Image (cartoon, rainbow, N blue to C red):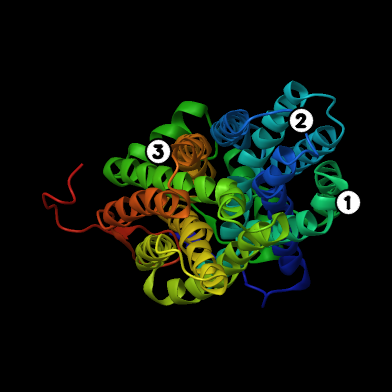
Amino acid sequence: MSITARRPRMSGALIGVFVVSWLGLLADGYDLYVYGATIPGILGGHGFDVTTADVGLVGSIALVGMLCGSLVVGILTDRLGRRRIFISFLTLFSLMMLACAIAPNWTSFAAFRFVACFGVGGLLPTAVAVAHEFAPAGRKSIVVGIVLTGPAAGTVIASLTALGLLETHGFRPVYAIAGLALLIVPACWRLLPESPSYLRSRGRVEEAERVAGRFGVPVEENAPVMAATIASSTRALFHGGRTRTTIVLWMVCLLSLLTIFGVSTWLPQIMREAGYGVGSSVSFLLAYSVGAIIGTIIAALLGQRFGPKPMVMTGFVAAAVALGLMATNPSGIAIAVLSAVAGFGGLGTQNMINDYVAQYYPAGSRATGLGWALAVGRIGAIVGPTYGAFIIGLGGGVSVAAISFAVPALFGAALMFAVGQIKSDSGAGVVEPAPTRSAAI
């Protein structure tokens, strides 16, 4: 039961929330995926004296930072609120990217990269939770889907920046440009409100109702008016019959992020070893990113009508098929198209998984649910770059690498089949499938 405030029609204040969330995720995506775009430069004489194995190891170590950020964010948002966490993590990773640009050696670069990814890992679940809470009822999937094009847009900018600067100026300016995200911080202070559900949980009921009234956010009557604890917010993920779905979603995220980070980290280098120049090889990452943006928007529109589950399964299958076709060594244009489809099946699919998770858990545990799902998923992200380095080391070129990343995508589609369909975009719950041998955990 809820007291629903009068909902404005996407007022300027409400749009401002989504814009700063999108800009924060754009910076998040740039900082996260710029590493893959700059690997050809780092290995090509403009960077440090490192090997392919060194690059893969640092890619994985940095993603350990993302795992830590995803785990910590659920705890910190319960204590400090989503607004302060969003702004703090955005500031942190932007400063660390500037530090990467001036790193004197590979060890320093790796350390700065680790801390930057810690901030990146914490921002995404916070931004998704904010967007979902403030999105108008009946349009949550669309709004969250549009906000989640931010990381893919950041990847596009990272790819274009690398194309323009990598061959002539090396990797350092590409990282320095990430510091421009600090310009977003003042806008966040002004436009981003605190979560009404957080305010109510801290006993600040009047403030919660004031924010809810301004932005048209429903305030739950039975929301707990108490200080949230780490244990209670985490336990909520396993109460009310959620245990099975929670575990399955963790495994789905793991397989999704293994595929994403394996492909996005090594796609430019794989294409370079296939005979393409540095610029052409990075352009395939650009096609991957554009496919993710277009695919996310289409999936969000369809997800609003059919729910996010079918879109997640479709995306996984699309990625597997596209990667499988890349193994046939098609022409450059065909590889670009397949890279775009793989982008939809990679980043686009993960965005729909995030939407599913945000709708599945109630407001009080939404950030925690997203944080834990992404934290477990980061295990796959950590494995992805090292897995890619291992596959490349075996030889076999594009064919072997493509097939190696198509397999986890197929497993992800099969696992997603085991979870229920979201009833609505209000976070009311799911319709669980009847238990079967294939769906059992």
Q: Residue at x 42, y 55 (%)?
A: 399
Residue 263 appears left or right of 248: right
Give the residue at mark 3: 236
Give the residue at mark 2: 48
The reply to whether callout 1 and callout 2 are in contact (CB within 8 Å) is no
Give the residue at mark 1: 183
User: Where residue 377 sits in the image (x, y, percent)?
Assistant: 46, 41
Label disc, if present, on residue 408 of the rendered structure: none
Q: Nearer the viewer, mark 1 or mark 3?
A: 1
User: Where residue 136 sits in the image (x, y, percent)?
Assistant: 58, 70
- Which amino acid type is marked by label 1? Leu
**Mark 1 or mark 3, earlier in chain:** 1
Q: Nearer the viewer, residue 17 or 341?
A: 341
Q: Secondary structure at mark 3?
A: helix
Residue 394 appears left or right of 147: left
How far is mark 1 from mark 2, CA to CA? Answer: 30 Å
Q: Nearer the viewer, mark 2 or mark 3?
A: 2
How far is mark 1 from mark 3, CA to CA? Answer: 37 Å
User: Where residue 60 sits in the image (x, y, percent)?
Assistant: 56, 32
- Which amino acid type is marked by label 3? Ala
